[in-house]
Amino acid sequence: MKRRVFLALTGAGIVTACARQGRQRLAPNTTLIIVRHGDRTGSDLNDTGRARAKALVGALDGIKIDAIYAPSVERNLDTAQPLATNRNLPIDRLPADGMATRLITQSAGKTVLWVGNKGNLREIWEALGAGGEPPLNYGDLFIVTSDKFGGVHIDRRQHGPAV
């Protein structure tokens, strides 16, 4: 009897720990395009970062984008702006609290772009339970796609000038 209680409590603890990690599945037919903001000097984009932001337009040519999301950080907004202007889309700002959950929920059934920072890129990657390293390098462009059955594929690309 004691063993059953122990096993039940241990199982409950494991479930609680997994729930705390916040792993979420992308909804079927969802594409989440994830990039880090452009290269910077200090807190602002430098010339390479501005060139990389412009190159994002060409890198995503032919991919329908339903929404663009970023935190309220100027370098992220500056990175997203050329694509937003090209596609005539607003840049929706997501607050830091619950950002990964909001992004994953709001992207359901759509194709969206997230322009992030190292911290929130890791948070999204962990929330998705994605394997490997998140797109932390300048120029990383990862396309996470969930098919109609919920199967996930990650296409790891690069964009912008080589440095």
Image (cartoon, rainbow, N blue to C red):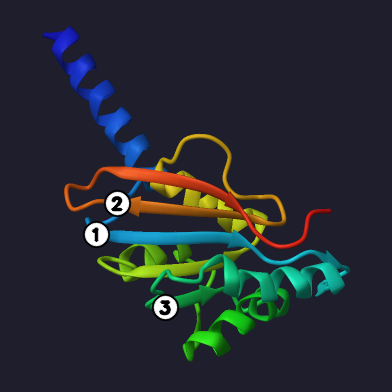
Quadrant of the rendered image containing residue 152: top left
Mark 2 crowdedness (10 Å alpha carbons): few <14, some 14-19, many ≥20: many
Quadrant of the rendered image containing residue 67: bottom left
Disc 2, SS? strand
Disc 3, SS? strand
Residue 15's label in the rendered image is none
Disc 1, SS? loop
Question: Residue lying furthest left in this view?
Answer: 1
Whole-number angstrom distance, CA of label 1 to CA of label 2: 5 Å
Mark 1 crowdedness (10 Å alpha carbons): few <14, some 14-19, many ≥20: some
> What amino acid is found at the position of numbered circle 1 in the picture?
Asn
**Residue visible at 58% across and 39% down in the picture:** 133
> What residue is disc 2 on?
146
Instruction: Locate residue 120, reporting x and y percent.
Output: 57, 58
> What residue is disc 1 on?
29
Mark closer to the chain start, 2 or 3: 3
The answer, for residue 129, to whether it is visible in the render is yes
Cβ atoms under marks 1 and 2 closer than 8 Å: yes
> What residue is disc 3 on?
67
Whole-number angstrom distance, CA of label 3 to CA of label 1: 15 Å
**Residue visible at 55% across and 86% down in the picture:** 86
Instruction: Locate residue 56, reporting x and y percent.
Output: 61, 70
**Residue visible at 30% across and 54% down in the picture:** 26
